[in-house]
Image: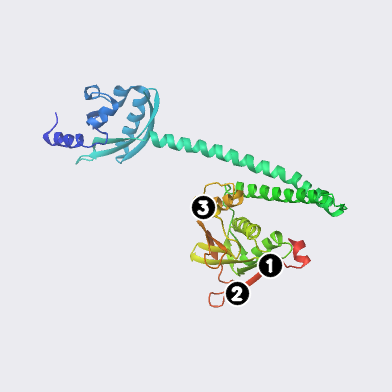
Amino acid sequence: MQTDNLKDQFAVIDCIPLPIFVLDVCKDGIPVYAHCNPTLLEQLELDFSNLAGKTAIEAFGTELGSVAYNEQLKTIASRAQNEFEFRFKSRGNDRYVRTTHRPQIDATGRVVRLVGSLVDISNEKIAKSTQEKLDGIGTEVEQFIAMAAHDLRSPMRNVMDLADLLYDDFEDHGDGKLELIALLKETAEKSMDLISDVLSYATTLGPAAPNCDYNLTDLCQDLMIILDPQNQHTLICNDLNLIGEKSTMQIILRNLIDNALKHGNREHLTLQCDATLTDAQTVEVSLSDNGAGFENPGIAFLESGEFRMESGYGLLAIRKLVTARGGNITAFNFAEVGGSCVRFTLPNTIDHTNSATNDDPHVSKISSNVDLKQQNAL
């Protein structure tokens, strides 16, 4: 027979909108249902008379009841709060529930009662399962893109080499054929750039590379050799020794520098790469230029992450790569003096033992003007 105090407790439980149940633990250690609040009974679509004095197995059958019953016994034995999840069928659909048991212990140390609560996590489980499926599909698509781009590089490089041979050895008769060969050469080069950008995009899903020591000036020097072989442009850069993912920094700067050189609309472009330590584990890098500046689609793309055909795969790759590493990226134009700036952060540290100090910053003017020995070494 219930005491008045217990009745009062049950009355309080009935006012709680969360599904709650109470089990009495008999002297033989068997837990039986003593009370269920209206919220739980409404979800179960049961009357308490179907549960009162019964074990979970007796109330819900062997398949479902055994799971709950065994967890109840586990809570009694451990004398500690216990949380578990289980799945069951309801009206033909899978439902997922997270159940928590809290033991009540009397003065002698015996568990006399279990108070339980239920939380329906079906939507959470469905969302997680759907996301896992989408991630799997996305990974397969990215792997296909990477393999396709990799397989296209060799034949496209052959087209570029053949176009170079034709252009160098062709005798111009003024009939427009040389111009067509030049157009073929330019088209092949742009196609190779696109393939490289696709491969860069595919790398954004890869795991983080091991950290290593590298010099920002040397990295930019190597990139300018590749991107500006005729030494038409100049890059000014901080001379800093960084510790971080060199490959990540290289992919980002390659895309940004290449984009600036292609769209700067200047015969001689000046770029500046500044890196500063924002906290113990983060470096902020700004790449600015005195070119034509971004058009709105480029800026909107970098800030929103939406794909736009005008931006190409390169900008998509760097933004995804930066955000995948926990950084952020923004772009803006210099309204008064012209030109643009892209600013991003990455996990990196500065090696102050070998880098120039802030009191005497060493700034290097970098161009692609290196001797043949350096170029061959690259």
Helix, strand or loop under label 3: helix
Tell me if residue 226 comes above or below residue 337 in the rendering: above
The local crowd at label 2, few if under 14, some if 14 to 19, many if 20 or more residues have their Cα within 10 Å, is: few
Count up the numbered dots: 3
Q: Identify the residue at image location x=73%, y=48%.
A: 187
Tag nearer the camera, 3 or 2: 3
**Distance of mark 3 from mark 2, alpha carbons?**
34 Å
Tag nearer the camera, 2 or 1: 1
Q: Label 3 sits on what residue type?
A: Ala
Helix, strand or loop under label 1: strand
Q: For the C terminus, which image quadrant?
A: bottom right
Is the residue under label 2 in contact with that under label 3 (CB below 8 Å)? no
> Which one is earlier in the sequence, the residue at label 1 or at label 3?
3
Q: Identify the residue at image location x=31%, y=33%.
A: 72
Residue under label 1, please give it: 367
Of 245 and 311, the residue lying toward us: 311
Q: For the N terminus, which image quadrant?
A: top left
Of 354 and 237, the residue lying toward us: 237
> Which one is earlier in the sequence, the residue at label 3 or at label 2?
3
Which residue of the protein is positioned furthest toward the left in this rendering? 4
Helix, strand or loop under label 2: loop
Residue 150, percent from left and from top? 69, 44
Residue under label 2, please give it: 362
The local crowd at label 3, few if under 14, some if 14 to 19, many if 20 or more residues have their Cα within 10 Å, is: some
Of 171 and 3, the residue lying toward us: 171
Q: Is residue 18 left or right of residue 368?
A: left
**Distance of mark 1 from mark 3, alpha carbons?**
30 Å
Q: Identify the residue at image location x=63%, y=72%.
A: 364
Residue 300, label in figure: 3
Which residue of the protein is positioned furthest toward the bottom in this rendering? 360
